[in-house]
């Protein structure tokens, strides 16, 4: 999947091969073990066309989002459509964005990247949407993923 110029990227280098890291993307239980760090995974169907549903607390309320898995390349990429269920709570809830998880081998390690992208769709509101997401998103998901993978070896 092509990542546009307006995106948020978080990354971590994990001391394991992509095949080992990818195992943590294969079931609901495994994904929720590292992703439920500020987000809550409610549904994960690990197949092309499968559904993914999350929630996060924003503005004092639980906000639900998610969508369809549109790219699934084992050991390389998982891309998901990201639509908010409640389209009335913020201006950026009306447009689809995307989450892309990429795994790249570097020597005997794996660079895992999460991209939240598609902000170009917001037109004049892209700047504010990008800044809002940038402020609210840290790297704790990937730090937890690294901890899980590296302690299993």
Image: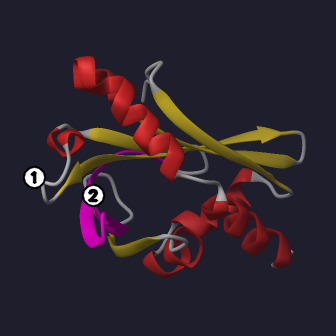
Q: At 44% across and 44% down in the image, what residue appears?
A: 133
Residue 42 image point, x, y percent: 32, 77
Q: At 41% across and 74% down in the image, what residue appears?
A: 40
* SS for dot 2: strand
Left or right side of 46 for 18 = right
Q: Is residue 118 visible?
A: no
Q: Which mark is residue 29?
A: none
Give 119 or 78, whichever is nearer the viewer: 119
What residue is shown with label 2? 66
Q: Which mark is residue 88?
A: 1
Give 119 or 70, whichever is nearer the viewer: 119
Main secondary structure of the magenta stretch: strand
Q: To which quarter of the image does residue 20 belong? A: bottom right
C-alpha distance separating marks 2 and 1:
16 Å
Residue 134 image point, x, y percent: 51, 41
Q: Is residue 61 above or below residue 15?
A: below
């Amino acid at each position: 999947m092509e990542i546009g110029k307006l995106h948020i990227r978080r990354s971590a280098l994990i001391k394991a091969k992509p095949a080992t890291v990818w195992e943590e993307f294969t079931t609901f239980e495994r994904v929720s073990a590292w992703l439920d760090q500020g987000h809550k995974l409610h549904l994960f169907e690990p197949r092309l066309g499968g559904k993914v549903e999350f929630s996060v607390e924003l503005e004092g309320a639980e906000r639900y989002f998610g969508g369809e898995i549109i790219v699934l390349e084992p050991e390389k990429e998982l891309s998901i459509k990201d639509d908010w269920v409640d389209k009335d709570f913020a201006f950026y809830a009306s447009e689809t964005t995307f989450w892309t998880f990429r795994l790249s081998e570097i020597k005997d390690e794996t660079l895992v990247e999460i991209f939240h992208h598609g902000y170009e769709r917001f037109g004049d509101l892209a700047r504010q949407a990008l800044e809002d997401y940038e402020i609210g998103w840290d790297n704790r998901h990937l730090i937890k993923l690294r901890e899980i993978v590296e302690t299993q070896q």
